Amino acid sequence: MKNVDIKKPFKSKGTGNIIIFIASILLIYLLISLYFSKHSFFNTVINGVDVSLKAHEDIEDIIRNYVKDYRLQLVERNGEIEEIIGRDIGMEYNEKNSIDKVYPGRNSFKWIISLLKDQKYYVEDLFVYNKDNLENKINGLNCLNTDIIEPQNVSFKYINGSYKVIEEVYGNKIIKDELYEDIEMSILKGVRKLDLNENLCYENPRYTLSSDKILETKNLLNEYVKAKITYKFGSEKEILDGNIISEWLSVDKNLETVISEIAVMKYVKELSKKYDTVGIARNFKTSMGKIVVVSGGLYGWKINREAETEALLENIKLGNVFEKEPIYTQKALYRAENEIGNTYVEVNITRQHLWFYKNGKLITQGSVVTGNPNRGRSTVLGTYMLNYKQKGATLTGPGYEAPVTYWMPFFGNTGIHDASWIYSFGGEIYKRRGSHGCINAPIYLAKTIFDNIEEGTPIICYEE
């Protein structure tokens, strides 16, 4: 008996069914493609108008109807909503547009892609409007005619010894050019809603709580206010700490910490005014037992303002904590009520007499001849100090040249020296034959002073 293969007919029938199915699918796809040759794809939007599956010949009417009731909704930062209505700005469908350029070259067989991907088109000349009307509408918006709150970066506030970060302020200040541009583009694109905040129409703070720079700036500010400098002025002290320093600190628009050099200079200047003693009026008890007020001169304490300002700035930046004396350009012997101490030269111009005390002991005294007041050469008044001493010097000036053995200057070319050309001292001689300002002394007196005096010793010149 002959064997028959029954699987072969079934196999042929199954293959035929597949071919028929595929052919049917292709036919359906071709028919749909034919449909889309004259219709828009799925998910097709032209300038904000949804024309999905619409016949090409109907699209213009659809867009015309869209324009008739067009209105652009402006969502503002404070939640307020304003509108720009199309008819108020003369918005119309442009009959001479180039919408026909959207379709040429489009392959209708690719319609299936539109199921997965939006088909958005923008035709630049699809709509027209009156620019003046639009500008007037924009100028009349509430968001441009309200009290302006300027944006502010995060700030820093000194509270209880350290700095806290204060949240930024966004404000409501509109960037008008940006607003106009975004509104115009929204109209041309047929957009119906414009969020001004999302589209960056507002001026925003540059630095916010989320900025990386915040921590760096805060740490630096706190480093500065950690500084504590205790200035010593003898038994008195001035403490400079964060409470004062914080008033000198600021943060610029780039969140850089700035120390006000002017404020630091003013602080040092105030210290100088309070504690400098050069030229101040001093109560001085004379050898005659009388109390006189002596003003002027060069003796005393004097802060070097420039150097101390520079040092203070550096100490603040380093957050230093320590005690110190300020930098001085000049120091007195003592920082007390009696800065002169008990070693000094006393010159009584009225009595034409000089006394020299060392450690409270009278070393020498004697009559002298001081500057001639009748020729405008009076000896300077005030408290000075010995600049240096020199053995053997020639004093020169207009019309004179005088060699001396003991030279002890205390104010420029004014000083104490011997005067071998004078045979009598004291009395009223200085009013007739007085010096050019120096204190002329007998050689014994000048020698004793010279042998015992040291640089910096106070020299007090006064009149009764």
Image (spheres, helix red, strand yellow):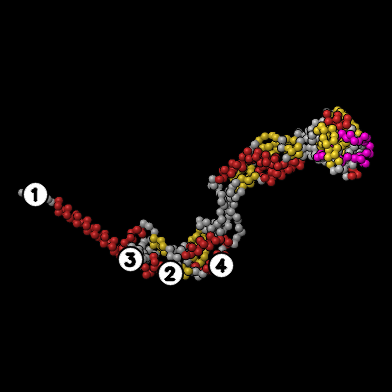
Q: Which residue is mark 4?
A: 136
| CA neighbours of label 4 inside 10 A, class few (<14), some (14 to 19), many (20+) | few
Q: Which residue is mark 2?
A: 97
298 relative to 9 in the view: left or right? right
State the CA–CA distance, disc 4 to disc 3.
44 Å
Foreground mark, 2 or 1?
2
Foreground mark, 2 or 4?
2
The amino acid pointed to by label 2 is Asn
Q: Which mark is residue 297?
A: none
Relative depth, front residue between 268 and 237: 268
Q: Which residue is mark 1?
A: 3
Q: Which mark is first along the chain, 1 or 4? A: 1
Kindly identify the residue that appears in the image at 83 percent across and 40 percent down. 396
Residue 273, position as x, y percentages in the image: 76, 42
Indicate yes or no whether the magenta region holds residue 419.
Answer: yes
The amino acid pointed to by label 3 is Ser
